[in-house]
Amino acid sequence: MSMPLWAMSLPWNIISEAAAKHKIPPYLLAAIVQQESRGKIWATRFEPAWKYMHTPDLHAKRLGISPETEQVHQATSWGLAQVMGGTLRDLGFMDHLPMACKPTLNLTFAAMHLSRLMAKHSVMAAVISAYNSGTPRKDATGAYYNQGYVDRVTKFMSDCDKIG
């Protein structure tokens, strides 16, 4: 079977390397990229409801920017995998957050985050849900609150798995 059209433009060399380094399935990382940015390297999105800041005053002072700028950057998702700035800080990213749009950095930190989520959650759907929402919460019917997201990422993974 041939590679899905959407997958052909992804940076598979970087995806494979980051996935191998952090022991996650490469198709999971590719599916996250497709869902989050459709492969757009410079994709960014401000999330005004984001409240999980990682010492913004300290990072701002160290980087020579205002605390408000650091807070906005931590509440923004960056790059191919749309990793939140606060998550990047939590994972040890010390540079200016817009630098996280660089594909190798972005995919390495996304893979690191997914690896941590996989260690915490034994079910792949829970990992996918947590990547998107922080925690894999379910409603009264047993569906994830972000079930549509989980289903789309799972379908993208399945598309890739058919070529492997």
Image (tube, rainbow, N blue to C red):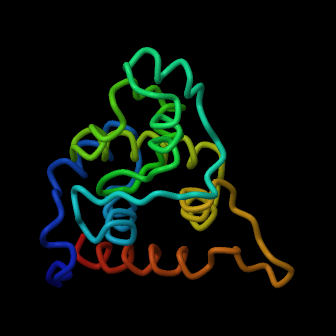
The residue located at (39%, 61%) in the rendering is: 28
In which image quadrant can residue 150 be found? bottom right
**Residue 67: x %, y % from top left:** 52, 29
Residue 117 position (above or below residue 46): above
Given residues 142 and 61, the one toward you in this image is 61
Residue nearest the viewer, comparing 56 with 66: 66
Q: Quadrant of the N terminus?
A: bottom left
Q: Position of residue 39 (x, y in %)?
A: 23, 66
Residue 121: horizontal and vertical position, in percent? 65, 52
Quarter containing the C terminus: bottom left
Q: Quadrant of residue 144?
A: bottom right
Residue at 40%, 29% in the rendered image: 93
**On screen, residue 28 above or below 38:** above
In the image as oriented, which residue stretches furthest toward the right? 140
Number of marks in the image?
Answer: 0
Residue 14 shown left or right of residue 77 in the figure = left
Q: Is residue 151 left or right of residue 103?
A: right
Q: Nearer the viewer, residue 12 or 130?
A: 130
Outermost residue toward the top in this view: 62
Percent coordinates x, y for residue 79 in the rendering: 30, 53
Q: Is residue 78 above or below residue 40?
A: above
Picture quadrant where residue 9 is located? bottom left
Question: Residue at position x 33%, y 63% from top?
Answer: 33
